[in-house]
């Protein structure tokens, strides 16, 4: 009897055995239900609509901040560069966000490594404590810090170091979350192998661990930068008289004047956030990072 031969595709190049049922080619993405697609588009519109309104209001050709705009003009864009209160606040917010990003990324990465690799009673409670600023309303956290600074007499009330500390408390949890997600999938045997070959702890971390968890660190750093740049609640209680962040400058301006210059300043703030997100998408494989599973 003739032997039946079934063609199951090309054999592996190394002549090895191929597991039964494995498919060649890219994996097919599951279809998304129509109601979920509609909900996603509605959420996208709701999130994007305020941005569009701010941009059009900043390009208004009228003398006041009105909607719909009377016309389109770059008049208030040039007025932004001539308004020292907005330009100085923008530069200071940019500097503050960079400083906070560096501090939060360093402290958040160390905290994530400690919480992920160390096992001790109360670890989950300590993790919840570190991530609690994500749950607390910003106005409550800002007020609590201000009361603590004033009542303790440590001299941080309405000072630049006190403002930086407040921003770090708000932004560090983002770094802890993203770096912890990357570390949950990290094989500690790789670092142990480097240590066994003579590498020191810092060298093993810098050459083995950091390149692998780099997407999580970079994502946390970008989140910290964006959150610090647009932080209003904490800055409202902790900002100094000589150093005013951009959100506070916009708030003060809209209290007494109703010119489109504030909306024009918002356009530059939005542009900075968009550039940061585009840079993140270029430096980080979002699809690979989003596929990290917790264990």
Image (cartoon, helix red, strand yellow):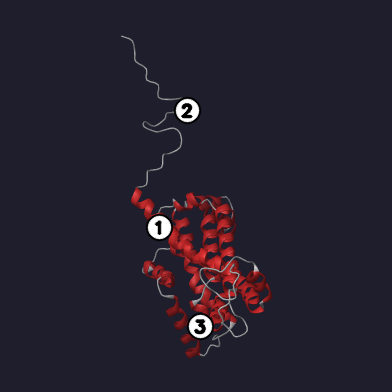
The percent coordinates of residue 163 (x first, y second) are: 55, 79
Asked if marks 1 and 3 touch (Cβ < 8 Å), the reply is: no
The percent coordinates of residue 58 (x first, y second) are: 58, 69
SS class, disc 1: helix
SS class, disc 2: loop
The image quarter containing residue 75 is bottom right
Q: Is residue 77 above or below residue 18?
A: below
Q: Is residue 269 above or below residue 84?
A: above
Asked if marks 2 and 1 touch (Cβ < 8 Å), the reply is: no
Q: CA distance from mark 2 to mark 1?
A: 47 Å
Q: Mark 1 or mark 3, which is nearer to you? A: 1
Whether residue 26 can be seen here: yes
Q: Is residue 180 left or right of residue 61?
A: left
The image quarter containing residue 85 is bottom right
Residue drawn at the location 46% of the way across and 87% of the way down = 147
SS class, disc 3: helix
The percent coordinates of residue 245 (x first, y second) are: 58, 77
Q: Earlier in the sequence, mark 2 or mark 3?
A: 2
Q: Quadrant of the N terminus?
A: top left
Q: Mark 2 or mark 1, which is nearer to you? A: 1
Q: Which residue is mark 2?
A: 12
Whether residue 295 can be seen here: no
Q: Which residue is mark 1?
A: 42
Of 40 and 75, nearer the camera is: 75
Q: Is residue 74 left or right of residue 33?
A: right
Q: Is residue 193 above or below residue 26?
A: below
Q: Which residue is mark 3?
A: 237
Of 279 and 159, nearer the camera is: 279
Q: CA distance from mark 2 to mark 3?
A: 65 Å
């Amino acid at each position: 009897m003739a032997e039946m031969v079934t063609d199951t595709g090309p054999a592996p190049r190394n002549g090895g055995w191929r597991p039964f049922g494995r498919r060649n080619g890219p994996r097919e993405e599951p279809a998304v239900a129509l109601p979920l697609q509609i909900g996603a588009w509605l959420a996208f519109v709701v999130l994007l609509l305020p941005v569009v309104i701010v941009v059009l209001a900043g390009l208004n050709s009228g003398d006041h901040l009105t909607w719909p705009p009377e016309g389109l003009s770059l008049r208030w864009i040039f007025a932004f560069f001539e308004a020292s209160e907005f330009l100085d606040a923008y530069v200071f917010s940019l500097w503050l966000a960079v400083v906070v990003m560096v501090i939060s990324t360093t402290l958040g990465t160390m905290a994530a490594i400690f919480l992920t690799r160390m096992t001790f009673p109360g670890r989950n409670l300590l993790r919840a404590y570190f991530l609690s600023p994500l749950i607390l309303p910003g106005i409550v956290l800002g007020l609590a810090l201000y009361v603590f600074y004033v009542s303790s007499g440590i001299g941080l009330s309405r000072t630049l170091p006190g403002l930086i500390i407040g921003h770090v408390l708000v932004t560090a949890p983002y770094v802890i979350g993203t770096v912890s997600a990357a570390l949950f999938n990290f094989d500690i045997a790789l670092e142990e192998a480097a240590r066994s070959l003579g590498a020191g702890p810092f060298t093993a971390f810098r050459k083995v661990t950091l390149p692998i968890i780099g997407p999580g660190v970079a994502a946390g750093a970008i989140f910290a930068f964006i959150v610090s740049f647009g932080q209003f609640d904490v800055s409202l209680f902790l900002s100094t008289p000589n150093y005013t962040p951009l959100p506070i400058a916009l708030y003060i301006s809209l209290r007494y004047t109703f010119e489109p210059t504030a909306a024009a300043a918002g356009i530059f703030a939005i542009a900075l956030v968009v550039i940061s997100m585009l840079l993140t998408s270029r430096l980080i494989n979002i699809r690979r990072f989003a596929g990290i599973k917790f264990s």
